[in-house]
Amino acid sequence: MSGGVDSSVAGYLLREQGYEVIGVTMKVWPQDCISRAEDKCCGPQAIADARGVAHSLGIPHYVVDEADQFERLVIDYFSSEYQAGRTPNPCVMCNEKLKFGNLWSKAAALGCDYIATGHYAVIEHHGDRAVLRKGIDLRKDQSYFLFSLRQPQLRRALTPLGTMRKPQIRDFIEAKFTMSLEILWVNMMASSFSPSASAKACQVVRSDRAMLSISILKRIASSSATPTI
């Protein structure tokens, strides 16, 4: 889980389909890069957002430290390819070596059968064989980020957003989570906006990365005179 909309909706969809979902976020940035990674993929803010999303979904959440491996397998690769005059693709390497590589041993230790992501790609499972195809939303297709995955990796991969388009995801968020926000708002009012309640609310609705769109927040906030969240 990155804390963003796509991985959050993927987790929600799988939970609704009957899967037992466990949220995992990789910490990939070395300690000396933390300040520069604040708003980057898998940076400190992303970890905090993912934790908040997992809490709102009612699923456990774990952080796996892959900083050393990320530096060796992704950053060093990027640097060497760039110096050699070639165009590196760090996301492909991260998916192959870390997300569907090193992470699998951790997922298996947690009793998981699959690793699911928010990629816009389709993975078809046919018995002991899996086929990677483009997502139906060609403007958002991310199958090329997964092209280097081998059969053992593809067979244990799930990409529930591959058959959806980005506008559907936005509509889905508004339809599914507006009521959750309204309930949250009522709970805040009932608690007289105590500091602890406000802190919990901020964790859930703090940004669109926490699975809730700014438009929904504005709509609810404008419905009555309210304090700033």
Image (cartoon, rainbow, N blue to C red):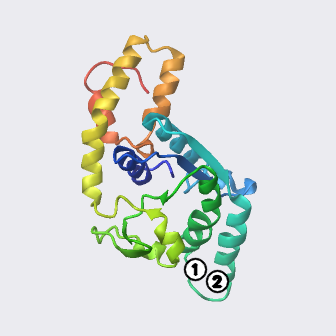
Residue in the image at 69% along x and 81% along y: 80
Q: Is residue 40 left or right of residue 182?
A: right
The x and y percentages for residue 223 are 25, 24
Residue 7 vs 58, above or below: the answer is below
The x and y percentages for residue 215 are 29, 40
Quadrant showing the C terminus: top left
The mark nearer the N terminus, 1 or 2, is 2
Residue 194 vs 120, above or below: the answer is above
Q: Is residue 120 left or right of residue 28?
A: left
Residue at the extreme bottom: 85
The x and y percentages for residue 103 are 62, 60
Which residue lies under the disc numbered 2?
A: 81
Residues at badges 1 and 2 in contact (C-beta under 8 Å)?
yes
Residue in the image at 74% along x and 53% along y: 31
Give the spatial CA distance, label 1 vs label 2. Answer: 6 Å
Dot label at residue 143? none
Dot label at residue 88? 1
